[in-house]
Image (spheres, rainbow, N blue to C red):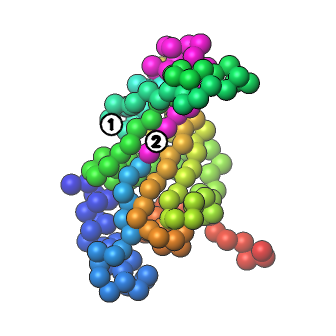
Amino acid sequence: MARLRDRFQKEIIPALAKELGFANQLAVPRVERVVVSMGISCAHGDRKRLEQAASQLGTITGQKAKITRARKSVANFKLREGMEIGCCVTLRRARMYEFIDRLVSIALPRVRDFRGLNSNAFDGRGNFSMGLTEQLVFPEINVDTAQFVQGMNITVVTSAKTNDEGRALLKALGFPFQKADAAS
């Protein structure tokens, strides 16, 4: 069992139930899934780059990446319906907890000039989204063999009903949010 999952069940759930005022521990918000995606702008011209991005995303997450296709045509972007434009991975259960643990404890501290995550990046229903500018912050990717730098989007989908519940859950899991300024 992943160490974060074990800590979540033994320590975080009782603490969150007390903090949020839930009588039943089953009412405490939980992380349902983590979606990691890469949009590759030059994918339709360079198939090799798309395959490398999918391979690196699979290495980072421990699960094979799915190639995503355009849903509709956009003339300004020279994009046709059905063209391959990126890749994504949806993580659940043990892999999800393992990824969150590596993200919080290893990858985020390696981000250059990192001052914390934006605490307002919630969607209104407790789900959190963030972006990384390069995949090289994960130690699984060898910097010498990486031929390009690619950003990624990470969405943490929770069962929280409000942003405050989602923020409390992610703080308990160790997400480093920015401190609110006392002046503002």
Q: Picture coordinates of residue 109 (x, y %)? A: 52, 50
Labels 2, 1: front one: 2
Give, as a single range, the part of the protein colored magenta: 35-52
The answer to if 87 sits in the magenta stretch is no
The answer to if 39 sits in the magenta stretch is yes
N-terminal of the pair, mark 2 or mark 1, is 2
Quarter of the image where the N terminus is located: bottom left
Amino acid beneath label 2: Val
Is 182 drawn above or below residue 66 in the view shown? below
- Which secondary structure lies at badge 2? strand
Q: Residue at x 32, y 36 (%)?
A: 62
The residue that mark 1 highlights is 62
Give me the disc on residue 48: none
Q: Note whether residue 8 is visible.
A: yes
Q: Picture coordinates of residue 50 (x, y %)? A: 50, 21
Local crowd size for mark 2, using a 10 Å CA cut-off: few (<14), some (14–19), many (≥20): many
**Label 2, label 1: how many angstroms apart (C-alpha)?**
12 Å
The residue that mark 2 highlights is 36
Q: Quadrant of residue 73?
A: top right
Which residue is at the far right? 183
Local crowd size for mark 1, using a 10 Å CA cut-off: few (<14), some (14–19), many (≥20): some
Amino acid beneath label 1: Gly
Q: Residue at x 36, y 57 (%)?
A: 32
